[in-house]
Image: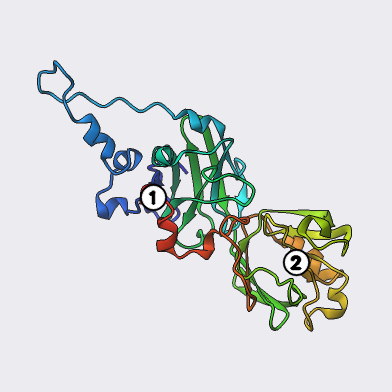
Amino acid sequence: MTTGRKGGRGRPARAWSAAAVCVLALAGCSAQAQADGGGKGAERGGKPAAGATGKERPKPSAPPLKSLTGAHINIADGQTVGIGMPVSVTFDHPIPVAERADVERQLKVTAEAEGSWGWVKDLNLADGQRVDFRPRTYWKPGTAVTVRAGAGITRHFTVGRSFVATVDVRTHVMTLETAGSSRRVPITAGAPGMDTWNGTMVVSDKGSRVFMDSRSVGYGDAYADYYYYAVHLTTSGTYLHQNPKANIYGGRQNVTHGCVGLATGGPAKRFFDEVVPGDVVKVVGSRDTVAVGNGYGDWNLTWDQWRATSALG
């Protein structure tokens, strides 16, 4: 979807190039005002230059920041994603605090949705190397989104059907809700002391066969083997995957090292086949909430908290 085209309900799409949140038709925010940060650029450019006759000169378009040449977007062009997927822009070097507002002004998301950019401390990156765009609520299924980073990067993607998996570690059951239907699946989660992260996570990717080594997460020689139908949830190594222990303990007891285990038969493969990057997995009844930068944990902040992470305030 491009700026100015109509969305599915005939309402104009909104272009969010900064953290300021406004409905264009009601709040009077023009696309140009958003592009220069709510009019601040116009104020700077409104003073006559030396030797001018008193008439204001038009402000030239600001050239793209050099920092945007090292930008990368997490969503491929033409991809279909789940309703929880944030737009995540990472940089090959940290953006200084003084430049982050200007960077946000050159990042634009065009969609029929209200949202905001926010700076995230990624688990594996330095501060200032990641900024995400998150809608106020989950994307509406069918939403068409265009992302532009400066003058050099453009992505178009579509939001697919709604799919939310809620894992209750107390009842050892995962409830799947999609397209108006619901089903319950027995699971086993992290054993006491190795608790599964609490909170909302978003699927980043998946692999039909993934090698997992307990030494990489500080659990010694507890395991080092391939696991199947592995759905990736956090940077620190949380997966929802096939686990032989779920054949015995699924629906009864939490015995894993922190991942969510599904039985090796139909349940694990069926979930793997259904899920796409951007789908939501919520864990309830556990202990510590997953950090915002440990994968796509953006949804663990309230809307006001999220907006406060923007450099534009």
The percent position of residue 39, horizontal first and vertical second, equals 26, 40
Q: Nearer the viewer, residue 22 or 226?
A: 226
* 28 relative position to 220: left or right: left
Q: Which quadrant holds residue 295?
A: bottom right
Question: Which amino acid lies under the numbered mark 2 shown in the image of this protein?
Answer: Cys
Dot 2: what SS?
loop
Which class describes the residues within 10 Å of circle 2: few (<14), some (14-19), or many (20+)? Answer: many
Residue 110, above or below 47: below
Which of the labelled discs sits on residue 19, or is there none? 1
Q: Earlier in the sequence, mark 1 or mark 2?
A: 1
Residue 308 showing in the rendered view:
yes
Q: Which residue is mark 2?
A: 259
**Residue at the far left in the pictured view:** 54
| Callout 1 crowding tier (Cα within 10 Å): few <14, some 14–19, many ≥20 | many
Q: Which residue is depicted at the point 54% across and 48% down?
A: 87
Residue 196 screen position, x and y as percent: 70, 70
Task: Confirm whether residue 112 shows in the render.
Answer: no
Kind of residue at disc 1: Ala
Residue 198 x %, y %: 62, 71
Which sits in the foreground, 173 or 236? 236
Q: Are marks 1 and 2 in contact (CB under 8 Å)?
A: no
Please tell me in which quadrant of the rendered image residue 243 appears. Answer: bottom right
